[in-house]
Amino acid sequence: MPRRRIAVLAGFVAGVLVASAAIIWLTGDGEPAATQQVPSGPPPSTAPIPTPVKRAGVALPRLDLSKANRREPIPGLPDWSRAGYRGGEPLPDDSLLTPDDQCRIEPEQLAEDYDVRPGDGTDDSAGLQDAIDTIRERCTPSASYERLSLIELPAGVLDVSRQLAVDADFLVIRGAGSDPVKGTRFVFRPDQNTRYDALTADGSDWDEDAMGYKDGEGGWIWPGRGLFRVQSRQVHEDYQDAYDDAPANRKDLFQGTVNVHWKAGVKLRDQSGGFAARAGDRVVYLADDAELKAFKVGGYVNIRAANTMRFYEQQQALPTDHELQNLHMRQQIFGIIAIDPEAHTITLDKPLEFDVPVSSTSEGSAEIGKKKYDSKASPLVDPVLGVGLEYFSLTQPAAANQQDATHNYGNLAPADALHGIVLKWTVDSWVRGIRTTMTGSHPIVTEEAKNLQIQGNYLDGAWNKGKGGNGYLRGSRVWDSVYAGNVLRGLRHLTLQWSSSGNVVIGNDMDADLNLHGGWERRNLFELNTVRLPYEHRPGSCRSNCGDEGGSTGAQDDSTWYPVWWGAGRKAVKWSGATGPQNVFFGNDLAKQLTENGRYVRYLPDQHRVYQFGWDGTSYRPLSQGGQPIADWAGNERADYTRGDGVEASRTDPGRSLFLKRIG
């Protein structure tokens, strides 16, 4: 097979924005020239930023993400040095592909053996799935990170009508380029068994609660279906009969999910004061009767800490009118480096970032909802390893006008709120050089994933950006991953949420906000990102299925989204809980248009100041004003939190990056 280099996002034109006056002027060596306190959200600058009409051209920073270019951990800050694919290894090139022709499917073979032919107007779903399944059965057992299988896609349009399951380890699915005309282009028209056949009562969103079958629940496929789903399809023996009997539009309920959560997870035992482990520990004490066969040295485990009333109090989420939830808000995937079957313990590859009570009541808290809820250690039974999706474009047509989706933060086609790429229970995988145009909802979304690299993608538009959490570049329950050099247009947010930790969001260009959405996400780094938020980027910009956000029904939300969003406990407890400690912003170029057709103003303007949200220098501190934690970030975006009120901003750094040694 000929080896070739494929240009990523070719044709981008460099654009330049003129910098406005900042609150603190910087001298040439990067040190502040004045000692004025920097509010976390500054008042308007006196000089406007020219407003680009289309911003078609972008100038992304040149990033060398290699281990050799990574800074040593900085004392007092989280360690991000091993974030991304394989802890900092370069994304694979052709030298790491297997030499075995049986494990390299080229376009000609796709056409001859699998009936996958571009531009013929026929459904390519079955052929593409068969090719993936062939690789899984034939090649995965002998594959590795240094011996990757390959499915090489032809140039042209490929038509897909149902979700493609990518559960073959160490597989690269590579297109002929992301140019929608010259490269590989997926057109995703989900069929009746893939579209959501159950909507909420008001018809505004898909209703996972109404999508059950026998013992299966629709929520088991969260975050929802997509064109590509990188996830195990393994079915637990307890659900095999239900899976066999289920209709086509319910079979996926029983694939993967039940293996990791309640079926494989084991309870914990008290090591000290009602805790199985404390923050900083590596050893976790399992229940004496815990089954250990699913735990493997070199494998992975999700440590899941039960919510407690004391934890809700720590978030300053009480009192609340919202129902408190028994769930595992604090969790994280770790590697297992040792198992002691006699002591019934496992040893993790890095220290815990949170305390792990044995249950929701073991440390002295009252019950939540009159129920005791157990913490768990849940081994990843069948994680998908080393999958790469690269160099193609995708779109999902819908029965709506694309122009109506511009700054419309509602759901134009609720039954079609499917995603582009779903990454669930996967480790050391990547997405690079793809272009999405008008996905149903999230172009890329994670749930239970570690050491991903989302790099060099152009993500443009979604049909659904409203109620129910739609239209994000969404990092949920994702750890130690890198989001680098991506361009976002016409999306709702770039979010990290639901206990996401140790991630680096660097060098992206966006017209959406950097959003800490709630659920104790912590210790993430946002740096070198360019954000320009137009006035229309606000919840009230909604013209379809708006719920309480805008439009003609409900109480309209008249707030606006600033370049940063932070989950206050009393607000975010409605769906999860507060944003956690020590999320760091450094060296970003952020600006917000405060009025329609008005000027853009700078936000967090000091390029060398380290802004640590939810932090007092040593421990978690919620953002506060007047001695009281804020109930909602909306309306408080421009307050000063740097005087002991939840944003630690006393330190500066002379470099351009806290993550990398050199930029450009």
Image (cartoon, rainbow, N blue to C red):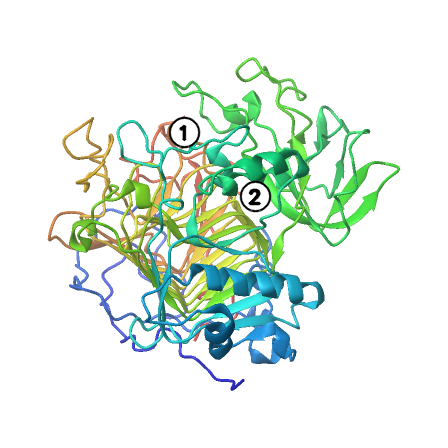
Q: Distance between the residues labelled 1 and 2?
A: 18 Å
Q: In this view, does 64 lie to the left or right of 87?
A: left
Specify the quadrant of the image occupied by residue 412.
top left
- Mark 2: which amino acid? Gln
Q: Nearer the viewer, residue 162 or 4?
A: 162
**Mark seen at residue 210:** 1
**Residue 456, image x and y in percent?**
41, 67
Q: Residue at x 62, y 61 (%)?
A: 136
On the question of residue 616 being in view, the answer is: no
**Image quarter of the N terminus:** bottom right
Q: Earlier in the sequence, mark 1 or mark 2?
A: 1
**Image quarter of the C terminus:** bottom left
**Residue 351, image x and y in percent?**
68, 46
* Local SS, label 2: loop
**Residue 627, image x and y in percent?**
40, 27
Q: Is residue 316 left or right of residue 137?
A: left
**Mark seen at residue 255:** 2
Residue at the extreme right: 342
Specify the quadrant of the image occupied by residue 13.
bottom left
